[in-house]
């Protein structure tokens, strides 16, 4: 198989889908690896590092012409997609719910598409779970960014001149990124609390040292995949009242509440922002899907009453080498399942992990993604 990695076109995206270490493994397994010129530069993997392991560095047109499998971080631009040859296999974090027009184009061109967002949350797929690997790093970066913007110290400090109280950090939405944010904030010495609509995460939060806040209702907030689902208005209203009084006493809030395929729910209103203390920080990790805070602006740091609201679209850009390493390993593990073990020149959709990610096959878009 000829397996290639594209250079990301988004100026905010610093990751690369294939790092030299994984390129070397693929070559050892008998595959030919092509890397688009400059694909790894922003992640500190220059062209030479790929050439040293036996990969070929080529221009885009050659890669699109020759590749059987194309690896990418994000959905490529329409200009690139329109050049893909029939029967190419495209694999990446493709955000299919927001890229339905591109899916139509790919189906029309007979391109097979696999979206890493749909890796099932089962134990045997953990090493392939790209959302988890990247969210872990994003949760860490959210706390580091917040602490750099915050004008006070995070841990309690006892000095001869007096004691400095620790910061209070509130995590809203406790998925993988939220849990890592809790762990990082605790390591920095903050007092941490968290909230989520899923009762199942309470124990995880408390095991990391965070207090857990939620409305006690019988309503089940977790879907069959382990993600949060849309809650009733009754629940949301009770949750808002409970959380509203807590928000005003927090120094740093990290928002990471998402519902797959839907706009992010608003968790912090303008009124609640204005109730916070001067110098407080809100980092809205859900901004790519609209944001959890009413005042967040995409790609900006908004300041209201000396409260900073961060709508950072590229939290892990500052840790791109590590993010690329983890993502590349996820892809390698996925390819081991995708490629037919008896004939590595063919792909197989028989494995349940692979079939779960297949969103365009034989010119057909998966039913749940059709418009």
Image: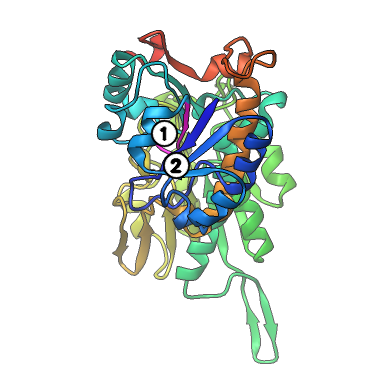
Instruction: Name the outermost residue toward the bottom.
Output: 161
Q: Which residues are magenta?
A: 69-74
Could you say where residue 195 lies in the image, as x and y percent from the top left? 56, 42
Quadrant position of residue 259: top left
Could you say where residue 355 lies in the image, as x and y percent from the top left? 55, 14
Could you say where residue 31 lies in the image, as x and y percent from the top left? 60, 30
Q: Quadrant of the C terminus?
A: top left
Instruction: From the viewer's perspective, tell me whether residue 115 is left or right of residue 185.
Output: left
Q: Which mark is residue 95?
A: none
Asked if residue 55 is among those painted magenta in the image, a careful observer would answer no
Could you say where residue 104 lies in the image, as x and y percent from the top left? 29, 17
Q: Which mark is residue 241?
A: 2
Residue at the disc numbered 1:
237
Position of residue 213 relative to residue 155, above or below, is above
Asked if residue 73 is among those painted magenta in the image, a careful observer would answer yes
Q: Are marks 1 and 2 in contact (CB under 8 Å)?
A: yes
Mark 1 Cα-neighbour bin, 10 Å: few <14, some 14–19, many ≥20? few
Q: Quadrant of the N terminus?
A: top right
Instruction: From the viewer's perspective, tell me whether residue 100 is left or right of residue 182.
Output: left
């Amino acid at each position: 198989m000829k397996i290639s990695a594209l250079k990301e076109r988004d100026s905010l995206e610093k990751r690369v889908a294939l790092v030299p270490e994984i390129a070397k493994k693929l070559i050892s397994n008998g595959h030919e690896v092509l890397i688009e010129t400059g694909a790894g530069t922003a992640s500190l993997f220059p062209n030479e590092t790929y050439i040293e392991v036996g990969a070929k560095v080529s221009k885009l047109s050659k890669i699109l012409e020759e590749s059987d499998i194309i690896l990418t971080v994000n959905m490529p631009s329409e200009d690139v997609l329109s050049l893909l040859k029939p029967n190419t296999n495209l694999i990446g974090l493709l955000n299919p719910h927001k890229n339905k027009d591109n899916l139509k184009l790919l189906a029309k061109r007979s391109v097979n598409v696999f979206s890493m967002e749909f890796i099932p949350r089962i134990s045997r797929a953990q090493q392939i779970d790209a959302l988890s690997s990247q969210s872990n790093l994003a949760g860490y970066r959210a706390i580091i960014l917040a602490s750099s913007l915050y004008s006070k110290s995070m841990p309690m400090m006892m000095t001869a001149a007096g004691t400095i109280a620790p910061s209070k950090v509130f995590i809203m939405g406790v998925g993988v990124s939220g849990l890592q944010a809790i762990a990082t904030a605790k390591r920095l010495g903050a007092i941490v609390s968290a909230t989520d609509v899923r009762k199942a995460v309470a124990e995880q939060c408390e095991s990391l040292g965070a207090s857990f806040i939620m409305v006690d209702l019988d309503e089940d907030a977790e879907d069959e995949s382990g993600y949060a689902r849309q809650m009733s208005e009754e629940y949301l209203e009770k949750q808002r009242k409970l959380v509203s009084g807590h928000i005003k006493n927090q120094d740093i809030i990290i928002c990471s509440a998402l519902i797959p395929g839907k706009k992010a729910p608003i968790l912090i209103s303008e009124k609640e922002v204005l109730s916070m203390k001067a110098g407080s920080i809100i980092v809205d990790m859900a901004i790519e899907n609209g944001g959890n805070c009413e005042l967040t602006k995409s790609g900006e740091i908004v300041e209201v009453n000396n409260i900073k609201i961060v709508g950072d679209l590229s939290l892990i850009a500052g840790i791109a080498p590590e993010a690329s390493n983890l993502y590349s390993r996820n892809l390698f593990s996925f390819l081991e399942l995708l490629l037919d073990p008896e004939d590595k020149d063919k792909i197989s959709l028989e494995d349940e992990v692979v079939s779960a990610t297949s969103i365009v096959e034989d010119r057909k878009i998966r039913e749940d993604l059709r418009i």
